Image (tube, helix red, strand yellow):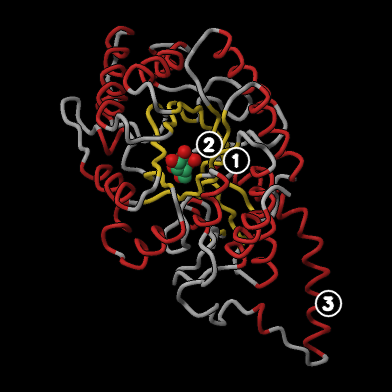
Amino acid sequence: MSENRDRLIERAGIGLLAIGGLLVLVAVVFGVLIAIGVGDESADPQQPGPAAGEPGGPTLRALAGPRRLLVGAAVPVEALKGDASYARTLAREYNALTPENAMKWDTIHPERNRYDFAPADSIVRFARAHDMAVRGHTLVWYRQVPSWVTDRSWTRPELEQVLHDHIRRVVGHYRGKIAQWDVVNEAFDSEGKLRDSIWMRVIGPEYIDLAFRWAHEADPDAKLFYNDYDLEFPGAKARAVMAFVRDLQRRGVPIDGVGIQAHELTVRPPSRKELQSALRGYAGLGLDVGITELDVGIYLPTSAAKLDEQAAVYSDVLDACLAVSRCGSFVTWGFTDKYSWIPSELPGFGDALPFDANYAPKPAFTALRRGLARGHP
Ligand code: GLA
């Protein structure tokens, strides 16, 4: 089970508890309004949203380009292949993308002697055809690792060899085509300890140094990132990752940046101050920073008010990034509610992205466009 998901559920619980009292109050007020005959059509999730179609006005990428900001989305290969509206909207609005799963171990390296580059190749081809940068995701993670790696016992030299081969082969295959690699993903648990994984058990903490060094050898021009969640919430984990990254730098490990995933919920978002101080903290170490997996789950059913709250969270995260010159990428985990991990992994939550399931722009999209047009807040 994903710890990322568990901690989102926990955060949802705290957030919902906090707004529970408020909801009772709202229910009472609502009851009174209904009793006196005042309806609120916009709050009815059954009402159709804005008409499907292009938003009109400048695109996100037209606004982000002059700021040298990568504005991107995670892309599932199935959507790109089978859904023309998906591909059209993606190419129109974004100047960057992250393969959602196609570069993870279980897809790209399903058997010891077999790599399957086809799904990731098709995403990279699409990006190049539409002049989009690619964030490679991810070389070393504790999840989505195939059983041929996890279900046998390795000696340390054997597993190092396996990891080295993987990184050399995958990074080498895309050499020159990937702007940023998430080299190591989620190496820390919520308490700020290096988490248990096959890499940690067999190789030890040094797997992280090795992964960065091998990735750098395979593509010296790609920017190499450490990527994790909850770095924007002050606490043991945020402190541990900051200290760890500083130590990597001190030891000369070739790390270029830190990715803040930013899977948020409207019920308990980080404050703008928290977001900014996390981004500034890494920028202060001389590193690039980025928002790498933003989405903002709504506790269903959606209402006009909740969509506005969601837009405010998107806006805060974007503003925090725009305020830090080393924040060079702003990537959402998908862009349409049609394809999002949230409803299946976080029951009760959904509608987390800036476009609805029919590709109509939501208030979150308008907020992003407004923020990009305005620039540094
Ligand atoms: C993590 C990973 C992503 C994705 C999301 C949602 O954040 O980095 O690749 O799997 O979880 O599932």
Which circle's residue, 1 or 3, is located before the other in the chain?
Answer: 1
Query: In the image, is 325 to the left or to the right of 358?
Result: right
Image location of residue 339, percent across then percent down: 42, 59
Q: Tell whether label 1 touches label 2 (CB within 8 Å).
A: yes
Residue 1 visible to the viewer: no
The vertical placement of 376 against 160, above or below, is below
Drawn side of residue 249 relative to residue 111, left or right: right
Q: Please tell me whether residue 339 is drawn above or below residue 288 in the rendered image.
A: below
Between 32 and 328, the residue placed more toward the observer is: 328
SS assignment at label 2: helix
Where is residue 38 drawn, in percent x and y? 78, 89
Give the residue type that dot 2 points to.
Glu
Q: Which residue is mark 1?
A: 7
Q: Which residue is mark 3?
A: 29
> In the figure, 134 relative to 23: above or below?
above
Label 1: how many residues lie within 10 Å, few (<14), some (14-19) or many (20+)? some
Q: Amino acid at mark 1?
A: Arg
Q: Is residue 76 visible?
A: yes
